Amino acid sequence: MITDPIADYLTRIRNAIRAKHRVVEIPASNIKKEITKVLYDKGFIQNYKFEETGPQGTIKIALKYNPVTKQSAIVDLQRVSKPGLRKYSGSAEMPRVLNGLGVAIVSTSKGVMTDKEARVLNVGGEVLCYVY
Protein backbone atom coordinates (compact mmCIF):
# COMPACT_ATOMS: atom_id res chain seq x y z
CA MET A 1 0.00 0.00 0.00
CA ILE A 2 1.26 3.45 -0.94
CA THR A 3 0.60 6.26 1.53
CA ASP A 4 1.32 9.07 -0.93
CA PRO A 5 0.36 8.11 -4.52
CA ILE A 6 1.32 11.51 -5.99
CA ALA A 7 4.85 11.28 -4.53
CA ASP A 8 5.09 7.75 -5.97
CA TYR A 9 3.97 9.10 -9.38
CA LEU A 10 6.62 11.84 -9.33
CA THR A 11 9.32 9.44 -8.14
CA ARG A 12 8.59 6.97 -10.94
CA ILE A 13 8.94 9.76 -13.52
CA ARG A 14 12.12 11.05 -11.85
CA ASN A 15 13.67 7.57 -11.80
CA ALA A 16 12.73 6.91 -15.44
CA ILE A 17 14.38 10.19 -16.48
CA ARG A 18 17.57 9.35 -14.59
CA ALA A 19 17.63 5.90 -16.23
CA LYS A 20 16.99 7.54 -19.67
CA HIS A 21 13.86 5.46 -20.28
CA ARG A 22 11.56 6.48 -23.12
CA VAL A 23 8.31 5.25 -21.52
CA VAL A 24 7.25 4.94 -17.88
CA GLU A 25 4.21 2.97 -16.69
CA ILE A 26 2.35 4.18 -13.59
CA PRO A 27 -0.78 2.89 -11.78
CA ALA A 28 -3.67 5.21 -12.61
CA SER A 29 -5.93 7.40 -10.49
CA ASN A 30 -8.02 10.44 -11.38
CA ILE A 31 -5.60 12.95 -9.83
CA LYS A 32 -2.61 11.34 -11.59
CA LYS A 33 -4.48 11.53 -14.91
CA GLU A 34 -5.13 15.24 -14.39
CA ILE A 35 -1.47 15.91 -13.47
CA THR A 36 -0.41 14.00 -16.61
CA LYS A 37 -2.68 16.18 -18.76
CA VAL A 38 -1.15 19.34 -17.28
CA LEU A 39 2.40 18.03 -17.90
CA TYR A 40 1.46 17.27 -21.52
CA ASP A 41 -0.19 20.66 -22.09
CA LYS A 42 2.88 22.48 -20.77
CA GLY A 43 5.26 20.43 -22.96
CA PHE A 44 7.09 18.50 -20.25
CA ILE A 45 6.16 15.07 -21.66
CA GLN A 46 5.90 13.90 -25.26
CA ASN A 47 2.70 11.86 -25.04
CA TYR A 48 0.54 9.79 -22.70
CA LYS A 49 -1.98 6.97 -22.86
CA PHE A 50 -4.53 5.79 -20.32
CA GLU A 51 -5.06 2.02 -20.36
CA GLU A 52 -8.03 0.49 -18.58
CA THR A 53 -6.51 -2.90 -17.74
CA GLY A 54 -7.35 -4.59 -14.46
CA PRO A 55 -9.21 -2.92 -11.63
CA GLN A 56 -7.08 0.26 -11.56
CA GLY A 57 -5.65 0.83 -15.02
CA THR A 58 -2.28 2.30 -15.94
CA ILE A 59 -0.86 5.51 -17.36
CA LYS A 60 1.88 5.17 -19.98
CA ILE A 61 3.93 8.34 -20.31
CA ALA A 62 6.37 8.93 -23.18
CA LEU A 63 9.13 11.15 -21.80
CA LYS A 64 10.50 14.06 -23.82
CA TYR A 65 14.22 14.44 -24.50
CA ASN A 66 16.27 16.94 -26.51
CA PRO A 67 17.49 15.02 -29.61
CA VAL A 68 20.91 16.71 -29.64
CA THR A 69 21.93 16.89 -25.98
CA LYS A 70 19.78 13.98 -24.72
CA GLN A 71 18.60 16.19 -21.83
CA SER A 72 15.12 15.64 -20.46
CA ALA A 73 12.47 18.35 -20.72
CA ILE A 74 11.89 17.84 -16.99
CA VAL A 75 14.85 18.98 -14.89
CA ASP A 76 13.24 18.34 -11.51
CA LEU A 77 9.93 17.36 -9.89
CA GLN A 78 9.30 18.35 -6.27
CA ARG A 79 6.38 17.31 -4.10
CA VAL A 80 5.15 20.30 -2.09
CA SER A 81 1.98 19.31 -0.26
CA LYS A 82 2.36 16.03 1.63
CA PRO A 83 -0.21 13.91 3.47
CA GLY A 84 1.29 14.96 6.81
CA LEU A 85 1.57 18.66 5.96
CA ARG A 86 -0.74 20.11 3.33
CA LYS A 87 0.25 23.38 1.65
CA TYR A 88 -2.59 25.62 0.51
CA SER A 89 -2.27 28.91 -1.30
CA GLY A 90 -4.68 31.65 -2.22
CA SER A 91 -4.74 33.18 -5.69
CA ALA A 92 -2.83 36.28 -4.52
CA GLU A 93 0.07 34.37 -2.92
CA MET A 94 0.33 31.57 -5.52
CA PRO A 95 4.00 30.44 -5.73
CA ARG A 96 6.15 31.22 -8.79
CA VAL A 97 8.61 28.50 -9.76
CA LEU A 98 12.00 29.75 -11.05
CA ASN A 99 10.53 33.23 -11.67
CA GLY A 100 7.86 31.82 -13.97
CA LEU A 101 10.06 29.39 -15.94
CA GLY A 102 8.67 26.36 -14.09
CA VAL A 103 5.11 25.52 -13.11
CA ALA A 104 3.40 24.77 -9.83
CA ILE A 105 0.58 22.23 -10.25
CA VAL A 106 -2.37 23.20 -8.07
CA SER A 107 -5.52 21.27 -7.16
CA THR A 108 -8.37 23.80 -7.04
CA SER A 109 -12.13 23.68 -6.82
CA LYS A 110 -12.15 24.12 -10.61
CA GLY A 111 -9.82 21.18 -11.24
CA VAL A 112 -6.09 20.55 -11.47
CA MET A 113 -4.23 23.41 -13.18
CA THR A 114 -1.01 25.41 -13.19
CA ASP A 115 -0.29 28.37 -10.93
CA LYS A 116 -0.68 30.80 -13.85
CA GLU A 117 -4.13 29.46 -14.75
CA ALA A 118 -5.18 29.65 -11.08
CA ARG A 119 -4.09 33.31 -10.91
CA VAL A 120 -6.09 34.13 -14.06
CA LEU A 121 -9.20 32.35 -12.73
CA ASN A 122 -8.61 33.93 -9.28
CA VAL A 123 -8.81 30.61 -7.39
CA GLY A 124 -6.55 29.12 -4.74
CA GLY A 125 -5.98 25.55 -3.69
CA GLU A 126 -3.54 22.85 -2.65
CA VAL A 127 -0.09 23.18 -4.22
CA LEU A 128 0.68 19.60 -5.30
CA CYS A 129 4.14 19.89 -6.89
CA TYR A 130 6.70 22.03 -8.70
CA VAL A 131 7.93 21.06 -12.17
CA TYR A 132 10.82 22.70 -14.00
Image: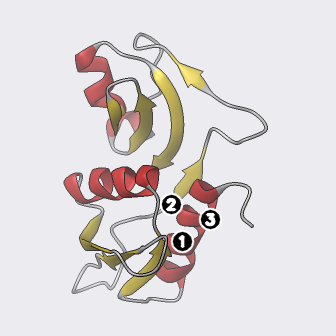
Q: CA distance from mark 3 to mark 2?
A: 14 Å
Residue nearest the viewer, comparing 85 with 70? 85
Q: CA distance from mark 2 to mark 1?
A: 7 Å
Q: CA distance from mark 1 to mark 3?
A: 10 Å
Residue nearest the viewer, comparing 43 with 26? 26
For the point 49% across and 73% down, the residue is 55
For the point 46% across and 59% down, the residue is 29
Marks 3 and 2 close (CB-CB < 8 Å): no
Q: Is residue 54 visible?
A: yes
Amino acid of disc 2? Asp
Pick whichever of labels 2 and 1 is earlier in the sequence: 1
For the point 25% across and 59% down, the residue is 40
Frontmost of labels 3 and 2 is 3
Residue 42 placement (x, y as % from top left):
24, 52
Marks 2 and 1 close (CB-CB < 8 Å): yes
- What residue would you read off at disc 3? 8
Identify the secondary structure beneath mark 1: helix
Frontmost of labels 2 and 1 is 1
- What residue would you read off at disc 2? 76
Residue 14 has which mark?
A: 1
Amino acid of disc 1? Arg
Marks 1 and 3 close (CB-CB < 8 Å): no
In this picture the colour scheme is secondary structure
For the point 55% across and 74% down, the residue is 12
Identify the secondary structure beneath mark 3: helix
Label 3 environment density (alpha carbons within 10 Å; few <14, some 14–19, many ≥20): some
Residue 113 placement (x, y as % from top left):
33, 37
Residue 72 placement (x, y as % from top left):
37, 74
Pick whichever of labels 3 and 2 is earlier in the sequence: 3
Relative height, residue 6 to residue 123 (above, below): below
Q: Quadrant of residue 124?
A: top left
